Amino acid sequence: MSDQSQTPPPKLHRTPHASLKGERVETLLIAGHTLTLHRPTEPDTLLDDPFVEEAFHADEYLPYWAELWPSAQMLAEAILTQPRPFPPGTRTLEVGCGLGLVGSSAAAAGLDIILTDYDLTALEFARKNALANAAPGCNPTVMPLDWRAPPPEKFPLILGADLLYEERAVEPLLRLLQACLLPDGQAWISDPDRKNGKLFGTKAQELGMVLEARPVHTFETDGKKIEGTLYRLALPSRVMPNG
């Protein structure tokens, strides 16, 4: 791992509302739960926005948050179908929440979820979606976060879907997990079998983290099967709970 003194300062973005071309509402059936999801009407148009072009040149930023990725559905299904559910009220951090499908499933399961992203417009959608799907008494919240600058709080559960589309994300994500997991906590990271996902698993084991890699899958609306991996991680010297 590189010296943390070389970590870039936190950076946040806000995709302009004018570039969204409105929003639409979808319903998704996830593991027997009907979830409501607000999302931009035409996410592809964001790539043509001058703000996005400028942000890409400054920090290689692209508005991936506006798409609904299969890995998010894989992780949402895993949360809602696990044989030993997390206790209601479990303090949970979602990293790179995007539209908030994973956070919405966690809220539907009654978890005390904080959804984070470094695009402030993404957080507006994520908050709306998590609140729309939350179990009674559950109050999901959002927080701006560049994972290169981990928050001070530690969590028993950290969630993340499709975060490893670039190799440069591997080490910052592992640093965040080391900084933010409680000693007996675990992280669930889903990935659509990108090569960086396998690199992430290798690096985690090199750090002494306990790793379990499970095959997972989901289906697109046309019935096409999408395969991936759910990486469950714990800090060194911990036993991964079953479930």
Image: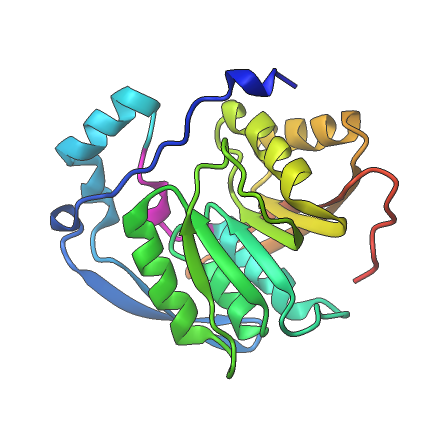
Indicate yes or no whether the magenta region holds residue 56: no
Would you say 227 lies left or right of 39 here?
right
Quadrant into which the N terminus falls: top right
Quadrant for residue 128, please give it. bottom left
Would you say 132 lies left or right of 155 here?
left
Give residue 130's position: percent from left, percent from top. 43, 67
Residue 231 seen in render: no
Q: Nearer the viewer, residue 159 or 184?
A: 184
Give residue 118's position: percent from left, percent from top. 38, 41
Residue visible at 20% across and 28% down in the picture:
53
Q: What's drawn in magenta, residue-wise? A: 62-69
Quadrant into which the C terminus falls: bottom right
Give residue 138's position: percent from left, percent from top. 51, 76
Indicate yes or no whether the magenta region holds residue 65: yes
Farthest residue in the bottom direction?
A: 136
Q: Is residue 162 above or below residue 129?
A: above
Colour option used = rainbow
Give residue 85's position: percent from left, percent from top. 71, 70
Quadrant for residue 90, please give it. bottom right
